[in-house]
Image (tube, rainbow, N blue to C red):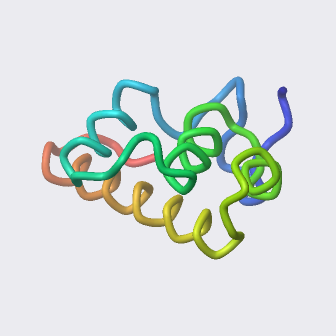
Amino acid sequence: RGRSCPTGRHSAENPLMKGAVYDALVELMRGSPESAANRAARRVLVDGITQAEAVRETGATRSTVSDAVTRYEEADRAMRDAYGLKNK
């Protein structure tokens, strides 16, 4: 879509994380990839859509989407720190 997220940190052209990374985090955190919250968070973090768009697409609540996005952003940051990788 090309529109950036509300924070301005990522977009469809510059996603916060790659799909494989997101999928690995969901698995490691024992999340359910099929849940509305995880589908919405993946769309935001990997595909670069806004949280509002993800809410409309998935039917998850705003707070649920926000919480899921925050949870996976923090997990990504923690893994990067653990491996000594540069955080975005």
Q: Residue at x 75, y 41 (%)?
A: 49
In the image, residue 64 above or below residue 35: below
- What residue is rendered at 44% in x and 56% in y? 73
Q: Quadrant of the N terminus?
A: top right
Tell whether 60 sits left or right of 25: right
Frontmost residue, 55 versus 19? 55
- Residue 34 against residue 6 in the figure, above or below: above
Q: Residue at x 75, y 56 (%)?
A: 55
Q: Residue furthest bottom?
A: 63
Q: Is residue 69 left or right of residue 5?
A: left
Residue 13 locus on image (x, y percent): 70, 24
Number of disc labels: 0
Q: Is residue 61 left or right of residue 50?
A: left
Between 22 and 54, which is closer to the camera in this rendering? 54
Quadrant in which residue 12 is drawn:
top right
> Which image quarter: residue 42?
top right
**54 lies above or below 22:** below
x%, y% of residue 47? 65, 31
- Depicted 52 relative to depicted 86: above or below: below
Q: Position of residue 39 (x, y in %)?
A: 55, 43
Instruction: Give the camera-side residue of 37 and 85.
Output: 37
Residue 9 spot, x, y in % from top left: 66, 49
Residue depicted at 29% across the width and 44% down the height: 25
